[in-house]
Image (spheres, rainbow, N blue to C red):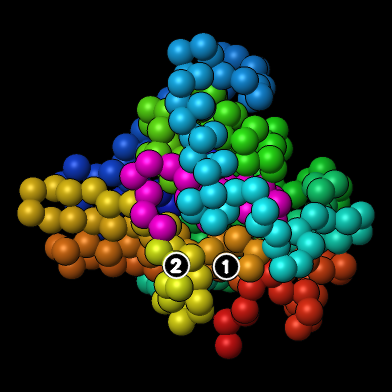
Amino acid sequence: MTEVKTRLQEAGRLVTLPDRPFDRLVERRGRERRRQRITTLTVGLLVAVGSLGGVGLLMSRLDDGSRDVGAGWEPSRRLALRPGEYFYLRVTSDEAVDGHVRDVETWWAPDGSGEVRNRSTRQDKYPYPPSGSYEAGEFPVEIRDVAELSTNPDELAAQLLHERWDWAGPAGPERMFEITTLLTLEAPYATPRLRAALFAVTSAADGVTVVADARDPAGRLGIALETSERDGMDTAVWTLYFDPDTHQAIAWTFESTRGGSAWILLESAIIVESGRQPGAEEWLMPPLT
């Protein structure tokens, strides 16, 4: 978890907003870690009575069909991992202020086996995930709560309002966007089905703007989810892009009217062999060319 916090701190330095929204996320994650040392509670499917109103509101948004992500949507290809299959993920980025450039490929199987090829710069500062081949149960996992999350959007929305996830802010839109950002960018063991469910939950949250027919920094067609924050006369905008056919995250961007910007690109696939590059029919999104 330390590496996740360090990368978020790096992002905070990059955006250079006075109120440092990424630093607040880091602080919340730190509180969550301290709570983990005290309790071994698992994420529940139900939340406290005081949060039920928020659950009901979000459920209604998921069911009303206004975001085109509720009942009736089907992915263009299978998202469930079968025995012997791996979730392939590649994450690349532009250069941060400290010279860090991300270039990581992972192959992860549900039994906890897989492979990591980390070609990122500044591994002296950002060693996660460490390169290597991993037997069952040995794949490096930083956010263990991920394994408890449902791939049903209704159940997932309720889980993310549980106090276990209080580090991401008050139960509401900000929490949903921050958790989705963290899991899509930092958790190669978050399955394709979970990623699609995170899209459904976040796109239905108040305060999140959905932009159809958007283009990610590489020019790929996607659905953009945007959230923004004002600081005086300046505005910062965070955007997550998802493939319209599979609802898999394809990119993240940050832009500020003060002049700061950053981008991260993702490529993912389901393949049957660890360490191999995906074939044309295995991609869950258009690959980068």
Q: Amino acid at mark 1?
A: Pro
Q: Mark 2 sits on what residue?
A: 212
Q: Amino acid at mark 2?
A: Ala
Mark 1: secondary structure: loop
> Residue visible at 19% across and 42% down?
19
Task: Please state, as top left, top right, bottom left or bottom right, where the C terminus lies in the image.
Answer: bottom right
> Residue visible at 46% across and 21% down?
53
Task: Please state, as top left, top right, bottom left or bottom right, where the N terminus lies in the image.
Answer: top right
Q: Mark 1 sits on what residue?
A: 244
Dot 2: within a 10 Å radius of its alpha carbon, few (fewer than 14), some, or many (20 or more) residues? some
Dot 1: within a 10 Å radius of its alpha carbon, few (fewer than 14), some, or many (20 or more) residues? some
Q: Is residue 204 above or below residue 255?
A: above
Q: Marks 1 and 2: CB-CB under 8 Å?
A: yes
> Residue visible at 70% across and 33% down?
148
In the image, farthest residue toward the bottom: 289
Residue 35 in view (yes/no): no
Q: Specify whether residue 287 is painted magenta.
A: no
Residue 118 is marked as none
Q: Residue 249: name its quadrant.
A: bottom right
Q: Is residue 161 above or below residue 22?
A: above
The region drawn magenta spans 185-210
On screen, residue 35 versus residue 24, left or right, reads right
